[in-house]
Image: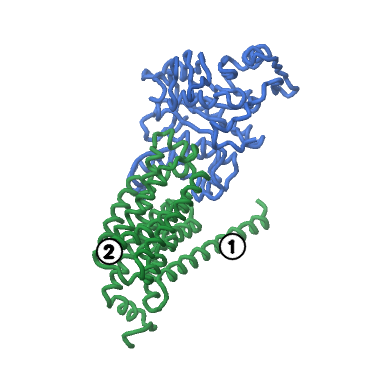
Chain colours: A blue, B green
Amino acid sequence: MWPTGQTGSAGQHGGAGQHGGAGQHGPAVRFDRAAVQVAGRTIWSDVSLTVDQGEFMAVLGPNGVGKSTLIRAALGLIGLSAGSVTVLGRPAGQSGREIGYLPQRRSFDAGLRVRGIDVVSLGSDGERWGVPLPWGDRLFPARRAARNRVREVIDLVGATAFAGRPVGQVSGGEQQRLLIAQALVRGPRLLVLDEPLDSLDLPSQSSIAALISRICREHQVTVMLVAHDVNPILSYLDCVAYLARGGAVCGTPQDVITSETLTALYRTPVEVLHASDGRLVVVGEPEPPARHADRHPDTAARP
Amino acid sequence: MTSSGLGWNIVADVRQLLLFPFMVNALRAGTIVAISAGALGWFMVLRRQAFAGHTLAIVSFPGAAGAILVGISATIGYFTAAIAAALVIAAVPRSLGGRAGSSESAIIGTVQAFALACGALFVSLYGGFLNGLTGLLFGSFLGISASQVLVLLAVAAAAIAVLALIARPLFFATVDPDVAAARGVPVRLLSTVFLVLLGCAAAEVSQITGALLVFALLVMPAATAQQITVRPMASFGLTIGLGLLIVWLGLAVAYFSVYPVGFFITTFGFAGYVLAAASRTAISRSRRRQALAVPA
């Protein structure tokens, strides 16, 4: 059972769809003929996709094609030039507390002398003005409940052993667990992750993918995840949106990641091979654009 | 026990320290400055804006020299110049990621050099206040008046009140700017407000330690405390405590000595930092050795 603390959201996660409140029914995310322009250039257009509640959905595609833009549009951080986006039954940008967001990043500075548990706590009350009173936990039950909630999510993501260490000194996979805990601390109904597996080693990639899938299944949290490599998450996915060449194709992984679909999407011959261990390999995919750094300044040094 | 010089009786020494009003004012001013510098310095070290902080302090030197040149109070010059410089630095567009970019540090460096040159010009235009120059650059506690203490107190109280209001979102925006922005924290605005507060603190510290030694109170206590503990509340409290300790010790020793107060404050801060860093290295080494000796 999803521990909800005192945030007033109790019961939302036990069975999404059984409650009558706004946004409880229907899809978690719906793009309807949406288009986005950045600095006068159309990034993608005519994108229609639907993510049902409780689904694990991946946004795939080569670098620079607008995957991050897609989820930023879903979060309401950038406006559409055409079409509409609905998130949890409301227009994008109006479901703030019910969305956990993990932006794309490389890592925390190695010298940052802040504990993992503090980073997770910021997820619960970081934007509140003022200063938390020292020893407030003993005086205010709400503070105590929030503190317990932080411990619960840290335990849920398996970060208890290293949450007390400076966050800059734990490994990339461990940092990613802490950041997932931070995104989960308020009990969101939708978890949006931008390249959470990026720059992790292979064992960390598969364990983080398994963790996200477990959160999705056991706690009925809809997951929308951006990736450029489908293999670590392929076995967990319910649906896929493949972005390329200014458009998108959506559906189940079996339908989308095929030679025919990708060839049509790229307008160049693309072949999907099935390796003996069940992995998919996409061959013939056009090279990512040379200048990728203009929209990802933090990741300019990425290979 | 004679009435001058340092003795072994600590009570008598302290009583002797408090004998003269200028020394009482210096201790009051030092206390105010240590608290505000510690509070702002803690965030500055965490935000890695030490270079900006240093520039704000350097800029306060031509501010004070210029104020003296045109015949107004140096205190006004300190604050005006530092706050103006804070607004200029805040106006420099940051790299999109939120961290200080290389273009920012280049601009800050350029401004800093020009400010120092202006200060030198103002001093030579005024002519013949060489003692004053040393005081502006390396600190002096002899000339602190009661009204100056009041100004320091008012500015420090206002700065700390604003800092208390924005502390938690500022911490969020420092540690995790992307998520903070996605959560609706006004990251850019907080950065500007923080720079102005830092300008106030740098101008305050300049008046005790001189423009060149502000880091003694702005960086050293915070850096030392963050070496000792990673708990935010504990290291914040420790920063203020260390700042008070080194200011009081520095002023007391300077009283019984002929050498500048800035030297002593800086030396105590430096010693504290070296001790903390060395013991942390030693502890982590011995822990590693233990971990190797007893495989889990």
Q: Residues within 10 Å of mark 2 (few under 14, many from 20)?
A: some
- Identify the amino acid type marked 1: Ala
Front residue of A275 and B247: B247
Asked where in the image residue B282 lies, by quadrant, the reply is bottom right
On the image, the x and y values in percent for residue A294 come to 55, 32
Q: Residue B47's spot in the image, x, y percent?
A: 46, 48
Secondary structure state at the residue bearing disc 1: helix
Left or right for A56, reference B186: right
Q: Residues within 10 Å of mark 1 (few under 14, many from 20)?
A: few
- Residue B149: which disc? 2
Can you say which quadrant of the picture contains the C terminus of chain A? top right
Position in image of residue A90 (x %, y %) = 39, 20
- Same chain for marks 1 and 2? yes
Q: Earlier in the sequence, mark 1 or mark 2?
A: 2
The residue beneath circle 1 is B282
Residue A135 placement (x, y as % from top left) = 36, 51
Identify the residue at the far bottom of this view: B1
> Secondary structure under badge 2?
helix
Please name the residue shown 40% across and 60% down the image.
B119
Chain letter of the residue beneath label 1 in the structure image: B
What amino acid type should be assigned to the residue bearing mark 2?
Answer: Val
Asked if A119 appears above or below B233 in the picture, the reply is above
What is the chain identity of the residue bearing mark 2? Answer: B
| Residue at x 32% of width, y 55% of height | B79
In the rendered image, the vertical position of residue A249 relative to residue B147, given as above or below? above
The answer to whether one can see residue A13 in this image is no
